[in-house]
Image (cartoon, helix red, strand yellow):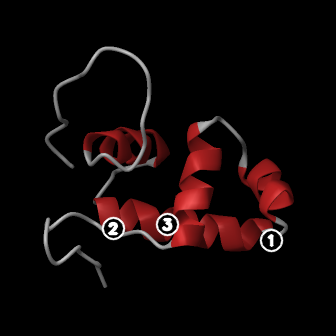
Amino acid sequence: MLHKNDFTNEPELTNREMEVLEHIAQGLSTKEAAKHLDIAPRTVDRHIENIRLKLRAKNRSNMIACAVMHGLLNINGPKVTEPDSC
């Protein structure tokens, strides 16, 4: 089930999903993120899949791009146009 913020109609991620998203965006592997968060790699994979579905992203790279476009992640650099699939 997709969770949307009632006021902005944007995807809403749990605190743990945000933690996982930030680690993955920093380039950590599933195993590395799991070690940092003290959870099982399979749990990280499940969170990644949930995030990907909530953002309607095609893959991990697209998931990060969509998260940036939705304002869930902040990166320094020039603003890019929004991908069609977000």
Question: Furthest residue to the front?
Answer: 7
CA distance for labels 2 and 3: 9 Å
* Residue 27 position (above or below residue 2): above
Residue plotted at (67% across, 65% down): 44
- Secondary structure under the numbered disc 2 in the rendered image: helix
Using the image as rendered, state which of residue 18 and residue 83 is in the foreground: 18
Residue wearing tag 1: 39
Q: Which mark is residue 49?
A: 3
Q: Amino acid at mark 1?
A: Ile
CA distance for labels 1 and 3: 16 Å
Residue wearing tag 2: 54
Tag nearer the camera, 1 or 3: 1
Badges 1 and 3: C-beta atoms under 8 Å apart?
A: no
Residue plotted at (63% across, 36% down): 26
Mark 3, other Cα within 10 Å: few <14 / some 14–19 / many ≥20: some
Q: Position of residue 35 (x, y in %)?
A: 86, 57
- 52 left or right of 40 in image: left
* Residue 45 position (above or below residue 63): below
Q: Position of residue 24 (x, y in %)?
A: 61, 46
Q: Position of residue 28 (x, y in %)?
A: 71, 41
Q: Amino acid at mark 2?
A: Lys
Q: Earlier in the sequence, mark 2 or mark 3?
A: 3
